[in-house]
Amino acid sequence: MSKITAAITAVGGYVPNFVLTNKMLEGMVETNDEWIVSRTGIKERRILKPEEGEGTSYLAIKAAEDLIQKRNIDPEEIDLVIIATATPDSMVASTAAFVAAEIGAKNAFAYDLLAACSSFLFGMSTAASYIQSGRYKKVLLIGADKMSSIIDYTDRTTCIIFGDGAGAALFEPNEEGLGLQDEYLRADGNGRKYLGMDAGGSLMPATEETVKNRKHFIYQDGRTVFKFAVSNMADVAEKIMQRNNLKDTDVTWLVPHQANKRIIDATANRMGLDNSKVLMNIHRYGNTTSGTLPLLLADFESQLKKGDNLVFAAFGGGFTWGSIYLKWAYN
Ligand code: UT7
């Protein structure tokens, strides 16, 4: 019997309707379109407004429904729903459990997975392991974040970067050797002082003081995070290539976390890849945290061909980072 690999067999995506442009941000904080585009590559991002829907679950449900409808699967066949997110609907109650119920995955168990911007990448490893072990046949991994819920729109160092969005990928067994081939995943908790949110967790529960001092918003030491992101994302992507004897000509697509176009360019450069092989939508959505990788797959699905070699790479808070090599499984 041939070895079972874990392949992505369907994808879906969703971004909310409201478009927050650089021009609009110019009226909110001291910034300008030229600075934002040249430093990040971002032109606009999407924001989930209350009149459209509430919570990360709204985005996740929409992305899952897109996948289910395109692939025409019965939600009752799904064994497990994992939501990769840094912005769950609330503490304690699982966002994934709610999403599973709403999409009709009534036979699935469900939980959330949190590793900041690397959540979806790490979730790919988790989803694939369940499939490779033979334990489950359909694992739905959704990367979703409503970043606008933790952004301070008076802080120009963060509000220009992040946006809301979600993407979904279905993992199923494959007997042709397609799907996840190799992974190199890393973490270094010393990085948590450079990117995070101080209050709202067990370390600093919410008080009047924490609200007054704006501690429930994300902060980042951009310059330091940038340096770590550039070197670490390129290092892991290069390592995955070396370990699998992949030359630049063997890599069909780089699927990079969309945090900053300059970080993406540096990674592609180290891998020796031409721009035409780099999937990018940062100009339209900004950094959607857990949503970036699956949204790329959803946006570029029609260009992905069976057998294509995809190298994923991400870097995020924690610090967390890594790279995954996957063979695309369908046309
Ligand atoms: O996804 C999770 C991981 N996160 C990342 O990977 C993000 C990594 N960091 C970055 O992408 C970049 O560091 C930023 C986009 C956040 C900032 O770009 P930068 O080139 O590192 O800028 P900087 O922080 O070094 O700031 C340069 C200047 C400063 O002014 P001075 O001190 O040189 O006078 C800032 O005050 O730009 C100023 N500045 C701005 N100016 C206009 C900072 N933010 C803005 C802004 N508009 N929005």
Image (cartoon, rainbow, N blue to C red):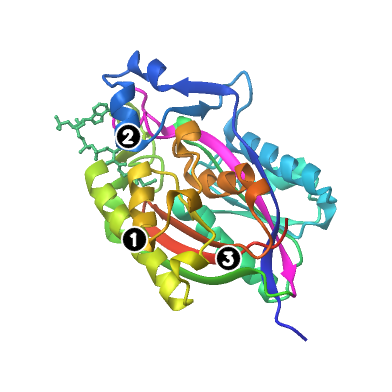
Residue 45 x %, y %: 48, 29
Mark number displayed over residue 193: none
Q: Verify whether residue 141 appears in magenta.
A: no
Q: Which residue is mark 1?
A: 270
> Mark 3 or mark 2: which is in front?
3
Please state which amino acid type lies under the numbered disc 3.
Answer: Leu
Compare residues 25 and 211 and report the one nearer the observer.
Answer: 25
- Mark 2 lies on a secondary structure that is loop
For the C terminus, the quadrant is: bottom right
Image location of residue 270, percent across then percent down:
34, 61
Q: Give the residues drawn in magenta, as a range.
A: 150-175
Report whether residue 214 is seen. no
Does 26 appear above or below 141?
above
In the rendered image, the residue lying farthest to the top is 27
Closer to the camera: disc 1 or disc 2?
1
Q: Residues within 10 Å of mark 1 (few under 14, many from 20)?
A: some
Q: Is mark 3 within 8 Å of ligand 1?
A: no
Q: Secondary structure at mark 3?
A: strand
Q: Residue visible at 50% across and 39% down?
A: 281
Which residue, given by chain and number where applicable, does mark 2 sit on?
A: 215
Q: CA distance from mark 1 to mark 2?
A: 37 Å
Can you say whether 264 is above or below 148 in the image? below
Image position, residue 130 (x, y; %): 66, 69
Q: Nearer the viewer, residue 105 or 143?
A: 143
Image disc number at residue 326? 3
Foreground disc of the pair 3, 1: 1
Spot occupied by residue 302 in the image (x, y as percentages of width and height)? 68, 47
Displayed-image quarter of ligand 1: top left
